Image (spheres, helix red, strand yellow):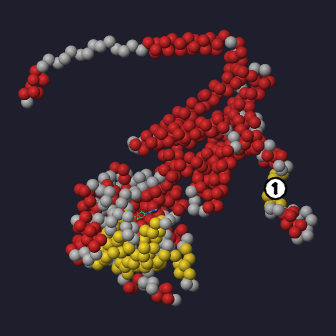
Amino acid sequence: MPTQATAPTAESGLMVRAEQVHKSFGPLEVLKGIDLEVRSGEVCCLLGPSGSGKSTFLRCINHLEKIDAGRIWVDGDLIGYRERGGKLHEMRDKEVAAQRQAIGMVFQRFNLFPHMTVLGNVVEAPVLLRRSKKAEARERAAELLERVGLGDKLGAYPGQLSGGQQQRVAIARALAMRPKLMLFDEPTSALDPELVGEVLDTMKDLARDGMTMIVVTHEIGFAREVGDHLVFMDGGVVVEQGDPREVIAAPRHERTKAFLAKVL
Amino acid sequence: MTTEEATTARARPEPIKAVPVRHPGRWVAVAVLAVLAAMFVHLLVTNEAFNWSFMVDKMFRPPIIEGLVRGTVLITVSAMLIGVTLGVVIAVMRLSDNPILRGVAWLYTWFFRAVPRLVLLAVFGNIGILWSRVEFGVPFDTQLGQLFGIDNLQLRLFGFSSRDLLTGFMAGLLGLALSEAAYMAEIVRAGIQSVDEGQTEAAQALGLSRGQLLRRVVLPQAMRVIIPPTGNETIAMLKDTSLLLYVPVSVELFFQLDAVGKRTFQIFPMYVAACLWYLFLTSILLVGQYFLERHFGKGYGASGRARMKLRGMTAEAGGAAGVAK
Ligand SMILES: Nc1ncnc2c1ncn2[C@@H]1O[C@H](COP(=O)(O)OP(=O)(O)OP(=O)(O)O)[C@@H](O)[C@H]1O
Ligand SMILES: [Mg+2]
């Protein structure tokens, strides 16, 4: 089958492959054909002005948004659909949920569960989805929280933590599902300036450990230091991409130049 | 420095001793109210029609207490249990992606909120007229039989006489519970919608299914919004059990008091007894509601205040509906 030939296999080293992704909200076309490849272990930084469709694209990768055209594969699996006999079949809720388990996501506004303790937040999904036994999950959650520097906050409620602490709990919560890929949607934009560093440090640790990450961010410093790949989006298309240090130092496209001039 | 020294050096001004503004209107109001209160007490004590000794004698009789416990209280509790459970189901249906479920839920709430409770209970009380027996089996069996040339085919498994099944008690309970479910559905829906969308997204991103995220993430948070108006609904339900008189349900407080009044030609004292009983019962619930709200309002400053406003609104809506019921 010709369509299956384009499907990347896990051996090719590609964690994410997006092909001509289109998405509209009513008459508004937000994504106008996005192509993107992210290798395993790579940190891909997504930059672009407000409204360029960065969040929307990120949400398409774990099927929080349904795409109108194109294909997205994560680790060789087509997201949201099954291809059979040259036809696409929509996946059931359960199957989509199973795909999402392998993709962690961190939101701008943390979205911790306020009625659960820090430990409860991290333990919830692995236990509910029977990934691990309760005692085991607790042990691992405590380990993860220790790793993000919150080993002493297990019993606290999210409302009792600072923004930076909450975001680190959110990262631990996503990691508890042992994802292959982590998506970050402006993880530091809602934080006071002095708290940005602690979250970025956690993300740097993660990158060093070889986690594949797609990070929507306005932190040019982070992109330059940690990013393996930089993608600049504007108006629903990828305008320019390449090595972060090169793109930031010498942007080729006018729109990239204008944007970088504003954020730098 | 010099100015500060100057001020401290200066003598403290003497405290203000002004003549306070007089409020003669308040004193007039107090006088008028005192007279009215005295007149009222005088009426209570001297008017023979109250017949207090008769009332006190009758209002604690066993049939009335039985009506209170096995009618009013039991039906309030059961109708609320069924109403809340069914209400959650209907609210979830109403918010589902499935247009058929959404439509059915809308139709349900439309019907049960549009028909006054009193009328609904009268209908349920007489629904036995439609069928003399209620039977379970293959639907449309006689018609299907005719299709295949069999006369009077009967494929029934078991059945009841509707007199046994739809006793006044069952009909009344069903009427109140089904109507309550419609109101509870709206309350639960408002509660679910009050939960931040980011919560659903975070749960979805973790890979939780719709049912799991509803049960573990959304409903527990919706509770804060759902509990207070549910208290109001319980109080309204307690009062509405008096409508069971029209089903009729004989083992019920108001029915019993009304019956005593009619039998003895002492209707008014028995109605006063009804007032006192309902005052007593709702007061107990009000105390319970106070503690419940204090518990669920803990630690929520601004949102707690917003909820108070919301609760006021639902209370108003409930009150208006109460008139229509
Ligand atoms: N659910 C939705 N319904 C309708 N329009 C939407 C929806 N979500 C996003 N949009 C629109 O799509 C466009 C792109 O939004 P998106 O959130 O992806 O931008 P962004 O690049 O993440 O911007 P920002 O940097 O401000 O977060 C915006 O114009 C937005 O109004
Ligand atoms: Mg965004």
Count residues near mark 1 (Cα–Cα under 10 Å), then give few for <14, some for 14-19, many for 20+: some
Q: Who's the residue at 38% across and 85% down the image?
A: A12
Indicate the amino acid at tag 1.
Answer: Glu
Q: Position of residue B138 (x, y in %)?
A: 80, 63
Q: Position of residue A244 (x, y in %)?
A: 26, 75
**In this picture, is B255 found above or below B301?**
above
**In this picture, is B324 found above or below B152?**
above
In the displayed orientation, state which residue is furthest to the front.
Answer: A254
In the rendered image, which residue does mark 1 sit on? B135
Q: Who's the residue at 84% across and 63% down the image?
A: B141
Asked where in the image residue A239 lies, by quadrant, the reply is: bottom left
Towards the viewer: A20 or B218: A20
Towards the viewer: B118 or B158: B118
**In this picture, is B72 found above or below B201?**
above
- The answer to whether B116 appears left or right of B9 in the picture is right
Asked where in the image residue A240 lies, by quadrant, the reply is: bottom left
- The answer to whether A51 appears left or right of A77 in the picture is left
Asked where in the image residue A154 lies, by quadrant, the reply is: bottom left
